[in-house]
Image (cartoon, helix red, strand yellow):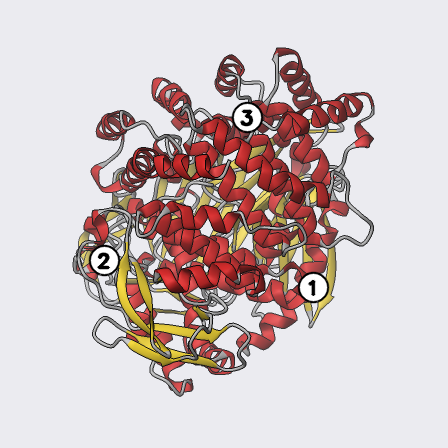
Amino acid sequence: MKSSALLLGILLAWLSQGASAAADRIVLPADIVPLHYEVAVAPDAAALNFTGSVKIDIEVRQATSRIELNAADLTFSHAALSGVAQEPQVAFDASEETATLAFAAPIAPGRYVLSIDYAGKINNNAAGLFYLDYDAAGGKKRALFTQFENSDARRFVPCWDEPARKATFTLTVTVPSDEMAVSNTPVASSETMAGGSKRVRFAETPKMSSYLLFFGLGDFERISRTVDGVDIGVITKRGDTAQGQYALDAATQILPYYEDYFGTKYPLPKLDLVAAPGLSQFFGAMENWGAIFFFERDLLLDPKISTEDDRQGVFLTVAHEMAHMWSGDLVTMDWWDGIWLNEGFASWMENKATDRFNPAWNVWLGAIGSKERAMRVDSRAGTHPIVQPIHDVLQANEAFDTITYSKGMSVIRMLENYVGDDAWRAGMRTYVQKYAYANAVTDDLWAEIEKSSTVPVTEIAHDFTLQEGVPLIRVAALPHAISLTQDRFAVDDSGKAPTAWRVPVVEKALGGKGEWRELVSRDKPAVITLANGAVPIVNAGQAGYFRTLYDKTLSARLAAHFRALAPIDQLGLLNDERALGYAGYEPMTDSLALIGRARAGMNPQVLSDVAGQIAALDVLYRDLRGRAALRAYGLRVLRPLFTKVGWNAKPGEDANTALLRSDLLAALNQLDDPQVIAAARSRFAAFVNNPASLTGDLRSSVLDIVAAHADAASWEQLHSLAKSAPSSLEKRQFYLLLGQAHDRALAQHALDLALGDEAPVTMRPALIRSVAEYFPDMAFEFAVAHAEAINAMLEPDSRNEFIPGLANVSHDPAMIAKLDAYAGAHIPATARQMTVKVEASVVYAAMVRDKRLPEVDAWLKRHR
Ligand SMILES: [Zn+2]
């Protein structure tokens, strides 16, 4: 899965207190093994329900008189077991989402066929079988899709809905004959029925987990290409195939690369990338085996509105989901506590594959931002180890978070860098071959890597995956040397307990040729000989997951040579200095002085980071007197950078300069720069008369600025553009703009729109989230007041996270009590991780405002 949400949850500290995981899991009894499902489904898209029947080949391993399996929101009309004359009694447990079939006499061990006829619902959000409505040339249309991760296959078919219960599936669907049906495997047969319908039977799947089954239906078109004998397709709504060409090209490049990397052929005859109109608050794409689901924004490019960020995002997302075809689908984690094996790995691989085919994008510099987000969460209350006990499905939902994805990715990158590319890949290959069509636990991976590596890796891997937190490497100047010692970085009491890691550290001297590689730990500091006056770069290349704190002497030396550092090390230094300053490890002024060293012409990703840091400071300065001084300083740093890149792309400009232009405009927009606002307004006026006058990145930036500073008239203009937008991608863009207004009354209008039925249903929660970026308190209170209506729009996976998440950028300490009150009334005690995380974020922002911003005020006064 690839997350789309800006705010992803983290887990409660108590989860990390080492509960014995396996014993506490809520899972189905192991005495019955599903082998094959023969599923037949007939959806009624208009009535929003479906009928189904399933025949499951099972093996009973121990005599039992009860068969328990998963079922949610399903009703059974008939159930029978082959060779057993008596019909079983069926009992449902709605909270456990199970059905139990009780027989009068025990069933002897052996093979049976369990048959169930049932009916279910078609949902309005991405859980189980769900619908998405959209406007098409001929009027409103409805398409159907399924979304089962992590545990919603049970809403589609009664099944053993756990990742380790792998089985084969054969799906047959009865559908309108003029629509296209899609599943994991190619169509094996299609037969015309009476009344304008057809019965489509798909080929049997390989042995796989239930959460990977997929079914899609609609007025679709498909473009395709055969690569290495695999039929790769992109499936879109009728008329949109041109927008899928880029993704098809990407998939064509990526497939042979992965086959080579994993040393294993792609295991299915076809691979479809399926685009769906709409969005989810929980995810952007899902790796159903052979039929990857994407919300349109993550797969399609519309030259009119798509930005460079969208383009790179599509490549990365396609690469992420395709990596899952091996890591996740072919080899699957044994239980949800190993979800990081799927997600951390795919997040790392998406960068590796994207970098291979688009070296100019420098995606590893971009990945520093992802590591930074992980470290932010990992250094305060509410963090958890990468590998964590997962008790039940609710907790599994919450595991799809920044730690799982971004820390997972960063730790894999660090370990690959430590053992070397070749050894890592050799280990990956044997791991995939050994556990193909089966399940694995994290230690199975380490065991294979260990075999191919010349250095031990398991202990280091355990340090970083089984314990939470961010290591801190303190670097001190000695005569002719530097010393490295290991500590822990934390912004609150979460880091009080001393924690030991074996930290792989790479050091270089600026301008020097060689590098040092050390394993630094609490009881084993390192001393590295270095010429006096040399400039040491610790964590050179930034593959390490830790923060670096230089002493005063070294810090000053690095700052003085900042522009001579490699861009990735400039980024690393900027991020470390910012985090260390905010947390009080060193003066904020070091970070501010470093920002001041930014110059036009430096690496665009480094300058984007500078722009982001200034904008983030401005957010913290909300309603404070010092804000004007910060803004004056921000404009002094950012305007020259913007003057150099300008409003319009230059011929032959590199992709990342387009990203920098957008990031600078976003920061200047945040600073309310009057020059930028005026220029954007005049471009918008021209756009209203001639929509072709703005496309892609510039269109997106101009609309953002106009929306943020909208008055009632321009807000209404955007509103009517939203209503009349011809495509769902454009609709999405305009509706989300309506939530960005900095005018309180207009923001309230946007919130009210989210409760009405004008905007497409999946965009309504996103509209509330859009308001929350500027008015977190207002959006949160609005959502609490209408919790029932809003939660009904969300897939169950999002319900415990969405409303607390709205408060994430609040800095008002009074928010804590409000969050507690909401969680106490609406969120089960085992699912309040997002609430804990948001509370930690609010407390931290309030602390920075209170303790650090006065330092910034003083520094700004001195540097007026
Ligand atoms: Zn994923």
Residue beneath disc 1: 252
Q: Is disc 3 in contact with disc 2, using a CB cutoff of under 8 Å?
A: no
**What residue is drawn where x is 55% and y is 21%?**
741
Taking the view exactly as shown, the residue that stands out farthest to the front is 862
**Residue 611, picture quadrant:** top right
Classify residue 739 as left or right of residue 494: right
Kind of residue sitting beneath label 1:
Thr
Instruction: Give the mark nearest the N terminus, 1 or 2.
Output: 2
Residue beneath disc 2: 29
Q: How many labels were placed on the picture?
A: 3
Say if disc 2 is inside 8 Å of ligand 1.
no
Residue beneath disc 3: 740
**What residue is drawn where x is 55% and y is 26%?**
740
Say if disc 3 is inside 8 Å of ligand 1.
no
**Residue 351, picture quadrant:** bottom right
Q: Secondary structure at mark 3?
A: loop
**What residue is drawn where x is 33% and y is 51%?**
586
Kind of residue sitting beneath label 2:
Pro
**Residue 110, picture quadrant:** bottom left
Q: CA distance from mark 3 to mark 2?
A: 50 Å
> Residue 289, can we see it?
no
In this view, the mark in front (3 or 2) = 3
